[in-house]
Amino acid sequence: VPTSVVFGLDSFGDTANDAAGNRVSDAQTIRDIVDQARLAEELGLYGFSLGEHHREDFAVSAPDTLLAGIATATSKIKLGTAVTILSTDDPVRVYERFATLQALSNGRAQITVGRGSYLESFKLFGFAEAESGRLFEERVDLLFRLLEQNPVTWRGQTRSGLNLQELWPKLDTPIDFRYAVGGSPESALKAGKLGAQLSLSVISGDPTRFTDYVQSYRDALAAAGKAPQPVSVHGPGFIGTTDDEAIESFWPMYDASYGKVSRERGRILPPQYATAKDHFVDEVRNGALYVGSAATVAAKVARTIQALVIDRFDFKYNSGPMSHEASTTNITAFATDVVPRVRKLLSASA
Amino acid sequence: VPTSVVFGLDSFGDTANDAAGNRVSDAQTIRDIVDQARLAEELGLYGFSLGEHHREDFAVSAPDTLLAGIATATSKIKLGTAVTILSTDDPVRVYERFATLQALSNGRAQITVGRGSYLESFKLFGFAEAESGRLFEERVDLLFRLLEQNPVTWRGQTRSGLNLQELWPKLDTPIDFRYAVGGSPESALKAGKLGAQLSLSVISGDPTRFTDYVQSYRDALAAAGKAPQPVSVHGPGFIGTTDDEAIESFWPMYDASYGKVSRERGRILPPQYATAKDHFVDEVRNGALYVGSAATVAAKVARTIQALVIDRFDFKYNSGPMSHEASTTNITAFATDVVPRVRKLLSASA
C-alpha cells in the first residue's frame, strides 16, 4: 500500500433538507456545497468531487461551474467530478470548461469521465440510450486527445469532425484524467490502455472483491507502456457516535436516495432479506457502505485500501436530503477522526 | 435620462501581454480577469461581463465558468456575458450553468444572448452558418421559456424536443435576460416582443445614430404589453492623461484586435482615409471609440447616454494584448475619474 494514500470527498449535490426537515432551495444547497468544500480544505483533505445529475433529487447539474466557484474560494484542494457524464456532453465544451477551471484553481482540476448511473441526460440532450457505448467510447478518446494540447484531427460517428483544431484556453499544467468504472472488465482495460487514472465506484457488495479487477487495470497500463497511475475507490458512508446510532441516522437518508432509485428501477429485494432495511444493514456490515462509529468506518476503509492496494479513498459524505449541518458533521468526523485512524491502521500493518 | 444610470465593464478576455510585451499564458490571463472583476467591484461598478470566443486571440471560451470563479470572489457586482453565443450552444446547458452561477452569486447572474461577431463556433460545434438565423431564434425562445421555471414542452428544428421538462437547479430569483443587438431592426423588435433587456453594441460609427433604434425597441416592448426594461450600450475605449497620449497608447492594441479582424475579413479601408490609423482616429473623434482623457471620454459617454436615453453604459476596458497593469489602470480611470464626471454632466443637464 502506498504510504502516500490520500483522502477525498464526493458529493452528488443531493437537494438538502434543513435541520427541521424542510427542503432548502437548490440555490442554498449549492452555496452550502461551497462551504463544505472550504471545510474539506481546512481539514486537510486532498480532493473534492461533484457528480452530475439532471433530476429533481439533485441541485448539481453543472458540476464544473460549481467547482469554478469553489476554485477561487480555496487554494489547495483538488477539484473534480464524480462523474462528468461524457456520453451526453461535448468533449470540446468539456475541455473549454475544465481548462478554465484549471486556470482558476491554479492547476487543481481533475476530470473524472463516466457513463453515470442515471439515464436522464440522454433524452434531455437528444441522444439515444442505445448509442450509449459508442458515445462514451468516442468522446473519451476525443477528450483525451484534446487534453494533450496538440492540434486535433478527428472523425467519428457521434459528433462533427475536427480538422487540426486547437482549443483555448491552453493549459499551463496537464489536467488529471480519471476514468470512472463500476466493475465492467472492458472499462478497466480501456482505462489502462489510455493511461488514465482509475476511479472505482462500489455502491453495493464487498469492495474487496475487486482486487483482481484493479490488478487487471494495472496490467493493462503496463501492457500499453503507460506509467503507473493512481487508483481510487468511491464509497458512500456516514459516521456516528456508535454503529447503531450511525445506522439509524443514515437509514432514512439512504432510503430516500439509493432506496428511491432502486424502487424507481423496479429492483427486487434479494430473497434473503425480509426488509429493505435488512438489506441496508447487511451492506453496512458486509458490503459497500462505510457506516458506523469512526473506529468501524476506519477499519473498513483501511481494509479496502489494503485489499485493493489503492492510492486514494473518496468518501461520499452526503446522500439524500441530509442537512448542511449533518453534512459538515460527517465531513469533520471523516477528516479528523476516521482519516487519522486509517493512517494508524495502515502504518501498523506496514 | 434615468437618474439611476449604472456603469459596467466588458472584456472579451483577449490574451494579454505582460508589461514587457511577452504573451502571458491563457491561464494567467484568466486569473488576472478575476482580479480585474474584484477591482471593478471595489471601485463600485455595477456589472462585469465576459465575451465568448473560440480562437487564439482570446483566453475566454467558457465565460460562465470564469464568472462562477468571480462569483465567490465578489459579493455585489452583477456578473454577465457579452455575449453568450446562443446560436451554437444548447439552451438546456446554458440554463443549468447560469442557474448554478445565479446560486453561487446570490442572484447576480445576467445572461446576454447574441449571435456573436465571429463564426468559429459554428464549425467547432458542428452547426451550419447558413442556419444561423433559425438556430438563434429557436434557442432564444427555448432559453427564455426555460428561465420561466415552468415545465417546458418544446418542439423545434435545431434541437431535440422537450416534453414537460423541468431543469435543476431551480432559481431562487429570476436571471436578468439581456438581448444583444448590433443594429439590425428585427433584433430590436424581437427583444421588445420577448420583454428582454436590450444591450446595444456599437463598435463603429456615431453611437447617437441609434436613437430611433432604441425607441423602436421600447415601442415593441410596449406593444407586447411588457414592462419597460433597461437599455445598455457597450463601447470600447481607453483613458489616458491626454487625448493624444490615449490615442497613441491604444492604437497598437486596437490594431492588434479590431484591426486584425478587419484584415482577416478582407475589409477595405474606406476611401476617405489614407491609413488605418486615420480611420481609427476618426472613430475616436467622431465614432464609436471612447478614447482620450477622462474629460473627453466622460463627455462622449454622457452624450451617448443622453442621446439614446439609456440606463447603463458598459465600458470595454480591454482590447488586444493589453497588459494586466494597463487593464487595471484603465478600469481605475473609468471608475474613479470618468464615471464621476459623467454623473456630473448628466445632473448638470438634468
Image: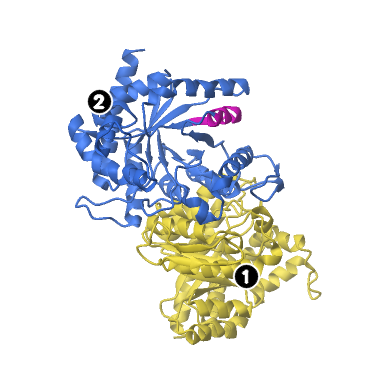
Chain colours: A yellow, B blue
**In the picture shown, does residue A70 fall above or below B189?**
below
Give the left or right position of residue B256, taking residue B188 as reference: left
Image spot of residue A228 (x, y percent): 44, 81
The image quarter containing residue A176 is bottom left
Depth check: give the residue in front, A214 or A195.
A195
| Residue B343 visible somewhere in the drawing | yes
Give the left or right position of residue B16, taking residue A244 as reference: left
| Residue B319 visible somewhere in the drawing | no
In terms of secondary structure, where does tag 1 sit? loop
Q: Residues within 10 Å of mark 2 (few under 14, many from 20)?
A: some
In the image, the segment drawn in magenta is B186-198
The image quarter containing residue B261 is top left
Q: Which mark is residue A270?
A: none
In terms of secondary structure, where does tag 2 sit? helix
Q: Which mark is residue B296?
A: 2
**Which three-letter amino acid code belongs to the residue tagged 2?**
Thr
Image spot of residue B159 (x, y percent): 65, 49
Identify the residue at horizontal 53%, vertical 49% (top origin). A30
Is residue B196 highlighted in magenta? yes
